[in-house]
Each structure stands twice: as structure tokens, then as C-alpha cells.
Amino acid sequence: MIKPGLLFLCTHLLWMCLGISVNAQEIVVNRLDVINNSSQLSLSAQEIDWIKQHQSVRVAVKNGWMPIEFQLENQKHKGVSIQYLEMVSKATGLQFKIVDYHDNMTTNEASLITGIRGKSIPAGFSPLAVPYLDTVNAIYVASHHELYASEITLDQLSGKTVAVFRNGVLPDKLKALVPGIKIKLVDIADEAFEYLDAGMVDAYIGNELVLDYHLDFHKITSIRKGGVTPITSKTFMAVSEGDPILRSILHKATLQIGTNPPEILENWGRSPENPLKKYLLSALSFFSVLLLIQLFKLYQTNKKQAVAAQQAIWFQANHDFLTKLPNRFQLKSQLDQALQAAVQQSQAVGVMIIDLDNFKEINDTAGHAIGDEVLIQVAARIQSVIAPPNLTTRFGGDEFLIVIQQSADAAHLTALSTQLLAAMAAPFIIQQKSFVVSISIGVALFPEHSQRAEDLIMFADQALYQAKRTGKNKFMLFDERIHDVFSKKTQLSNELRSAIEKHQLRLQYQPIFNLSDLSCEKVEALLRWHHPALGQISPETFIKVAEENGFIIDLGEWVFEQILRDFAEIRQQFGAVEICINISPLQFSQPAPIHQFIAQLATLGITGTHFCFEITEGLLLEPSSQVIDILNILHAQGIKLAIDDFGTGYSSLAYLNKFKIDYVKIDKSFINGITENLNDQALCKTIIFMGNQLHIKLIAEGVETQDQETLLKEMGCQYSQGFYRARPASLTG
């Protein structure tokens, strides 16, 4: 006769080896365990009473962070966090009830939150002192990259472009450890892997446990782990600040269990193997024939549940959790199949990329929860227009990609694009509030534009960019002219990155004259780029490219350094003039070079009164606290501020009055027709009158004739800059 205890042990063993899941919605342990464990934890009588009085503790768990914590289609939570909670439950006798985490979690909804990283913690919660996970950040590279062949260290990434997850402290730590590293921020691992495949970044640094699991689960072989970093990522539990006794209990439990319990990490490491499998045959030898039959029946009964769980895991890995649409991995497979079928049947395939216009404004003003609901409703409206067998996928962020397999000609794609634009016209009603969302669409065709999936996506994306650049809320069909523009811009971007090293950049200085006595009181520093093959490249062209690829920070730093090298010669050639420097809004978001420039002035004994920063109107419309702080620092240093190209943008009186603006520069587009065009005269007169009333001095740009200068002086303008008096020129020394 088989003993009941042995029967239970063998049954439990078989269940685990067959992968039958345990309900993780509630974590319950025999409360008799607390009698033994309380002495090991040194729980006080008050803490034991607290456990007895609280039937369960609500814990908020995230649902899309494999393998740390994730949720199956049947709403069951799994992962490292769940297993750690089971260990805490066994050690303390606490019972946990799992609830879904969201960004605005309150202490009324849960007393405990798992998966806490960095400083992003809902109000009312604070982390435990001891993390339950402390995982290494590893370096990943693509198989076609030069770094692939050898072990990689952080030192080798100096000067390289590295993808890093946007949230957390890793970007700042890498900048501190690796001089010259260039950070590319990403929102999800899929985005980083795309950049690696495309050669847009040299490496990706991220959580080793998460990324190893990701690569193994999706069988990705084109990317490998090339090394590890000394930087680790800590994961904490956060407890309601109103439950100090619960915090004390959990603190003692985490101290006893420790960080990175090996019995948990072995289950979720790359290519995990269940250690119980090798004992299966030995365990089964204790069973009688009758018991084997009963267990087989039990297996048959639960087989459907196991299959359903596997299907749920597959669905989650291949679909977007928010919209339930196929994700990038599913898209790649489906698009390849569609192109193969199109080749066999001599048919066309259309690729459409949709991007929401100004979606960031909704997230910033209404919150990410509203933004998520907008994305769900946008997906539903797209699917109301795009029917199977055509495929709609969430491509990332606020982008959707559509594969059209039926009637994929230019006329039909134009009609579909028109329907999609119309479908978004009605406002989205969310939480009794109305939100207006428009979309832009880029379209590419197989085989007309390319026969490769990657090229079709790239061309559709280029068409999308052109649609957004020319007004938004429209669609654009790809053509070769669009590709030529992008190719030239890409070439220009690559050449610009080496322009400093190859000494292709120089500064010219254009005098600015006081109209009262025609004395030169200021000079504007103007950046020039002469390429040996492409010739003289317009600043309007390369400055825009530099702002798009982030290189404007390096250019700005070089300009600061060159002006200081030229300072003595400027004074010798022009006298004690004020030097005007153009500053991009992006330089205020990464202000280290500005602070460094101010520090160099102090080192050289040069006062800030010798300089004026020219900024654009857009920077001051809704300035961040960082921008305001920098403006205050500049004012304290005596550095003046000028609004450049005034009249072409918002032309708001509010910010002129709010901030300490010294000069307004009237854009040359108004000066060109000032002597003939009465409208231009009226606008210039109004701007000058407004400036004088606010005690702000006016500088007219692009003055090319004596008549223009005379009229401006009569209107009350104080300064003139343009070819009439002096062209930009290099220093004579």
C-alpha cells in the first residue's frame, strides 16, 4: 500500500515537471509555519498579532516585465517577484492578494508594490532598505558589428553610441564611467534590438536577467552578450508609509531570504532547466500501475490548462499588451510571409506607418493613463477601416504599422489613407473629457519601391517624416525624391560628425552698428562649414541636421571654445564689442557646455558682460524649471539675452515682459520689403514701438540698403546688421 504522504510528494513532483501552473492570484501559506519561522525572524509579539489580524495583504504587481513580473492571458501573474512573495509568505505567514499595478497606485488599493526601480515610486510608498534583486547590466552587440568577435569592456565603448533604457540611473552612471560615450535612449528592448540590427547604435546595455531571458525566449541569434558592466540594477519592494509594522515584518523577511535567492534565479535564468526532471524516473518507480493510470488521467485533465498557459505566453510575447495588436516580432514574421506569397502570386503589398500628431502633449498634460486609453481607441478606429487579411500592428510608442495584402495599388492605398484620416476626425471621449488626435501616414509599395521588408518599412517611415514635416494630418506616398532627401541628410549627418576633427568648421563675425553714431558695438559669431567635396554648406541646412541628430551639443561646445580662443583678436580688430552667440533650445536641455563656458570665463578673468546669447521665441513659451534656472544664472553673470528672428514665430508680449530680455532682433524677412510693402512697414513699426515701451532695444537683421536703414532709424530702431554696412568675415589675424 502506498502511503498518502508519498502519493502527495510524487503527485506534486509530477505536476512541477509537467509545467502545470499554480494559481498566483492569491499567495497563501499554512499559518502554522509562522510558529516556527517567527523565532527565526525574531518577530515581536506585536508583529505576530498584526499577521494574525490581517487576513491578506494587497500587493500591486506589474504585468509586462518578463521574467521579473508578468501576467498571462488568464490574468495569472508569474515571475521572480511572485516566487519571492511566496518565500516571504512562507517565512512570515503573511497571505498576499495580487492586484494589477498602475502608475497612479494609492495606498487604498495596495499596501505593497513589487518591481520598484530608481526613484519612480507612487506617492505614499517608500522602498525597503534591502533589494530583493540586484542584477548586473550587460553589454549586447549585433553579430555584424566589429565588437562581436571579442569580450567587451566599458572602456571600449568610449566614443561609441550605446542604447540605454530611458528610465533609471544607468544613463548618468555610464556618462560618469565612460568618457565620450554617446547615449541613445530607448523605451523598450525591441527598439534597442532594432537599432542594433540597423547599425544605428554600437551596443545596448541593459538588465542581464531580463535581456538574456528575452533573447532566449525569442531565439534571437543575431545579437549576443559581449560582456558585463560593474553597474547593477536594484529592484525593491515598496511598502505603504502608513503600515510601519508591515514594513518591519517585510524588512526582517528580506534580510533572512536575502537578495537574488539562487533557487529563484535558477528558474528564470537563460535556458532554465527544471532540476526536478532528472529525478522523474526515480520518483515514478515508486508508483504502482494503478497510480500511474490515475496520474495519467490527471495529466489529461490538466493538459488543456498547460496548453492554454503556453498559448498565453506566446500571445504575450507576440502581441502588444495594451492594444492586443501584434507587435514587432509578429510583424516581422507576418510581413515576410506576405511578401513571399506576393512573389508567388505576382501581387503587390502595401506598407503603411501611422504616427499620432502631438501625442506627447496628451501624455504631458493629461497623464499616461489617458494616453494609453487614447492608443487603445486609436487602434480600434484603425481596425474599423483595416480588415483581415490585412494586418494592423503596434510598431512602438505612438506608431502603428499596417500591411495591406488586398488590392495594394496606389489608388486603393490612397483611399484607405483618406478613410483613416477621416476616422480620427471625431474627438476621443475619455473620462468625460474630449481629446482631438490627428495622424500622419507614410506609404510604401512592394515590389515598386523595394522587395525587402526592411527597405519597405524604412521608405514608409521616410514618407511619414515628409508628411509630418509638411503639415501633419496627411498621408504621403513614398517616391525616390523623398529617399534622395533622406540619403543626402544621412550623408550630411555622418560628415558633420567628423567636421570638427577634420578642421572644416570656422567662425565668421558680422558687425552690428548703433544707428545713433554708426559705431560697431556688437559682433555676431556665425558658424561656417566648408566641406572639401560638398563645398560651402548653408548653416540653415547643417544646423537643422545637427539639432535632429543631437550633434548640436558638440557644435555648441566647439563654438564656445573657439570664441574664447578668438577673444583677444576680436577686441583687437573690433574693440570692446559685445559678442553675440546663437544658442539652440537643445543646449538648454543638456546645459553642461553652458556651465563650462561660464566657468572658463571666470578662469580667464573675462566678465559675462562681453557676451549676448541669442535664443528663439519657442524656448520661453513654456519653459521648464531647468531653462528658468539657466536664464537666471546667465542674468547673474551679466550675459545679455536677445530674441532671434522675432516676428516669424509666436511674437508674444507675455514672455518679453516676464523674462529679462535685452534685445529683440527683427527678422530679415520683414526688412526686405520695408521700403515698398506697407504691411512690412506697419509690422516693423509695431515691433519697434512695443520694444521701446518695454525698454528692450531693437536690432534689425538683413539690412541691405541705405533707404532701409534710414527708415528703421526714423522708426526708432537702435541697431542695424546686414550687408549694407558689413558682411560676415573671418578675423584678419
Image (cartoon, rainbow, N blue to C red):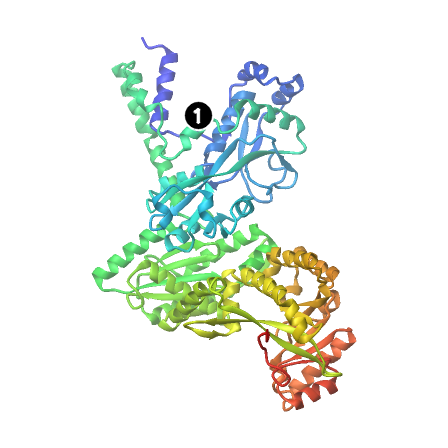
Which of the image's four quarters has the C terminus? bottom right
Which of the image's four quarters has the N terminus? top left
* Residue extending furthest toward the top: 1
Nearest to the observer: residue 295 or residue 404 = 404
| Residue at the image point whose x is 54% and y is 21% from the top | 91
Please indicate whether residue 349 sits to the left or right of residue 467 in the image. left
- Please state the horizontal and vertical placement of residue 253, each as a whole percent of the image: 57, 24
Nearest to the observer: residue 586 or residue 520 = 520
Does any portion of residue 617 appear in the rendered image?
no
- Please state the horizontal and vertical placement of residue 507, each as a whole percent of the image: 57, 70
| Residue at the image point whose x is 36% and y is 46% from the top | 148
- Please state the horizontal and vertical placement of residue 597, each as a whole percent of the image: 64, 59
* Residue extending furthest toward the left: 344
Q: Which residue is mark 1?
A: 263
Tag 1: amino acid: Glu
Q: Is residue 148 above or below residue 658?
A: above
Does any portion of residue 100 appear in the rendered image?
yes
For the residue carrying disc 1, how many other residues have a C-alpha within 10 Å: few (<14), some (14-19), or many (20+)?
A: few
| Residue at the image point whose x is 36% and y is 27% from the top | 274
- Please state the horizontal and vertical placement of residue 578, each as a whole percent of the image: 69, 71
Q: How many marks?
A: 1
Q: Secondary structure at mark 1?
A: helix
* Residue extending furthest toward the front: 733
Q: Is residue 78 above or below residue 574?
A: above
Please indicate whether residue 645 sits to the left or right of residue 317 in the image. right
Residue 5 appears in which quarter of the rendering?
top left
Residue 306 appears in which quarter of the rendering?
top left
